Image (tube, rainbow, N blue to C red):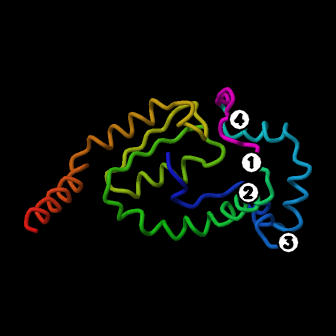
Amino acid sequence: VSGATLPWKVRDLALFRALASPPGRFLAAPVVTAFFPNSLAADIIREIFAPNPVPPDYAVRTGAALAVRRATLAADARQIAALPAETARLEDDVPALALPVEIVHGTEDRIVPPGPTAVRLSRLVPGANLVLLPDTGHMPHHVRPEAVIEAVDRAARRPGVGQADATATEAIATEDAQE
């Protein structure tokens, strides 16, 4: 469960690039937001969670209606349109990660497919642990929170985790004692 780390084929990228362009921000975004039906928002949320059910009151608790404000839609479009280039820039640095990496991904994720992202990341990062959750979509932290918690716990138990903090604390204490 993470932000975008590796490039993948972003669905509807042309639409996001159009909305992110200056004409799109100033012309298309106002039109889209003015005529955006609430039923479409519910359909999009269902697609994001598919094949899993959307948790009750998810849209209300997360403020999903805010996503169709002009400024928010334009900002989201700019971020999504930039993903391919931004993740491509990160890709070369991924193998140098020297920290515990736990990757949790749903096998049925239709938004960010596991093959070019999670599976590939697990092969690029030395010692990474990949957990593919069957019958789980894009939101494992909502529909399978126990698996995410287990991954965090595994990462915390790995050798060396917390040692840097302890070493830094000892160094600070030593400096304070010398002053």
* Residue bearing mark 2: 72
**Amino acid at pointer 3:** Pro
Residue 9 image position (x, y, % from top left): 65, 58
Q: Which mark is residue 23?
A: 3
Judging by the rendered image, the residue that carries numbered circle 4 is: 60
Indicate which disc, 1 or 2, sits on the residue closer to the N terminus.
1
Q: Secondary structure at mark 3?
A: helix
Query: For residue 141, which numbered disc appears in the image?
Result: none
Residue under the point 67% across and 60% down:
80
- Identify the residue at the far front of this view: 179
Please say if the residues under marks 1 and 2 sit with CB atoms less than 8 Å apart: yes
Highlighted magenta segment, given as a residue range? 52-66
Q: Which residue is disc 1 drawn over? A: 66
Query: Which amino acid lies under the numbered mark 4 shown in the image of this protein?
Result: Val
Vertical position of residue 1 compared to residue 136: above or below: below
Please give left or right for residue 152 compared with residue 40 in the image: left
The answer to which of marks 3 and 1 sits earlier in the sequence is 3
> Is label 4 or label 3 in front?
4
* Closer to the camera in the image, 39 or 158: 39
